[in-house]
Structures are given as C-alpha cells and as structure tokens.
Amino acid sequence: MDPEDLQVVSSLAQDAIFPITEMTWRAAERRFAILINRFRWEDQGRDRHAPERVQSLLVIDNVLRVASQGIDRNDRDTVLSLLSVTFEPGEEGSGHLILTLAGDGAIRLEIEALDVTLKDVTRPYRAPSGKVPDHS
C-alpha cells in the first residue's frame, strides 16, 4: 500500500466510532487492529434508505511501537471517533501512521512499512443516529 491508497482507506474510515476496548496491540505479531463501526460514505442509496454503518476491521501490520495522546486508555467506557488516518514517511518505507481522533486525541503507530487493511465484517445496518455525520 502507498500513501495514495491510504487516502482511500482514510476517507472510508472517516467518522468511524469504536469503544476503546476494541483496540488490540499484538506486539509479538507486530499488528494493531481496531473493530470500528464505520459510516458507509460510499453508499449511493442513502436517499432511498436511512444512513448506514458497517462493522469493519482496521488492521495495521509491521507496527513497532504504539503511543497515544489525549485519551484515557484505562477508561473502558470511552467511545472514540476516528477523523483521519495519515502517514508521516521516514527512511526506506518506515514512518508513523497517525490515527487522528475527535477531541484532540491521537494514536501514533511507528511502522516498518505501510501495510493497512480495512475489511467489512458485518452486513450494513441502519445508523443508530439516523443521520449523516456533519462537519460544519
């Protein structure tokens, strides 16, 4: 995957929500994963039915370290909202993947190489709010 592909993943994952308990860091496997409830931005049928979300796995491989700021990882009731996924390149394909969260939070992954997967794992369901996320 390259930074241009990552822009597509970021746009599909924008406004995803997830409980803090759905983040998993497996250091031995060098894998960081989140089970997210993403808004279906690509759905062209919203005018015929209510807005939808779908549960998806956001998986980042080749992760060397994980750090966060602006979130209390001990508060198991926290629900986070993902705003964007960006890449800050380093040397020879390495760098940092930044998951920017609403409310000034962020997760920073030091990666050896860019390898991100977004996979839907459930059927779409009606968005509980019944609304499209608003960025105004």
Image (spheres, grey):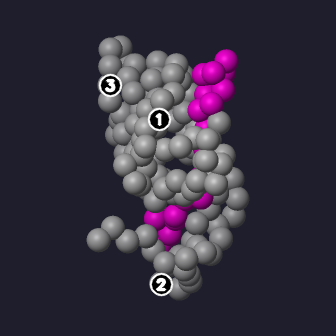
| Contact, mark 2 vs mark 3 (Cβ under 8 Å) | no
- Residue 1: where, in percent of width, then height? 45, 32
> In the shown orientation, is residue 22 left or right of residue 98?
right
Segment tinted magenta in the rendering? 25-45
> In the shown orientation, is residue 59 left or right of residue 90?
right
In the image, which disc is placed on residue 39?
A: none
Between label 1 and label 3, give the one nearer the viewer.
1
The quadrant where residue 11 appears: bottom left
The alpha-carbon separation of the residues under discs 1 and 3 comes to 18 Å
Residue at 54% over, 33% down: 60
The residue tagged 3 is 89
SS at mark 1? strand
On screen, 6 above or below 43? above
Q: Nearer the viewer, residue 72 or 2?
A: 72
Q: Nearer the viewer, residue 19 or 72?
A: 72
Q: Earlier in the sequence, mark 1 or mark 3?
A: 1
Q: Earlier in the sequence, mark 2 or mark 3?
A: 2
The residue tagged 2 is 47
Between label 1 and label 2, give the one nearer the viewer.
1
The residue tagged 1 is 68
Residue found at the far right of this picture: 122
| Contact, mark 1 vs mark 3 (Cβ under 8 Å) | no
Crowd rating for badge 1 (residues with CA inside 10 Å; few <14, some 14–19, many 20+): some
**Circle 1: residue type:** Ser
**Circle 2: residue type:** Asp
**Circle 3: residue type:** Pro
The alpha-carbon separation of the residues under discs 1 and 2 comes to 38 Å
- Residue 75: where, in percent of width, then height? 61, 47
- Decide if residue 114 is in sight here: yes
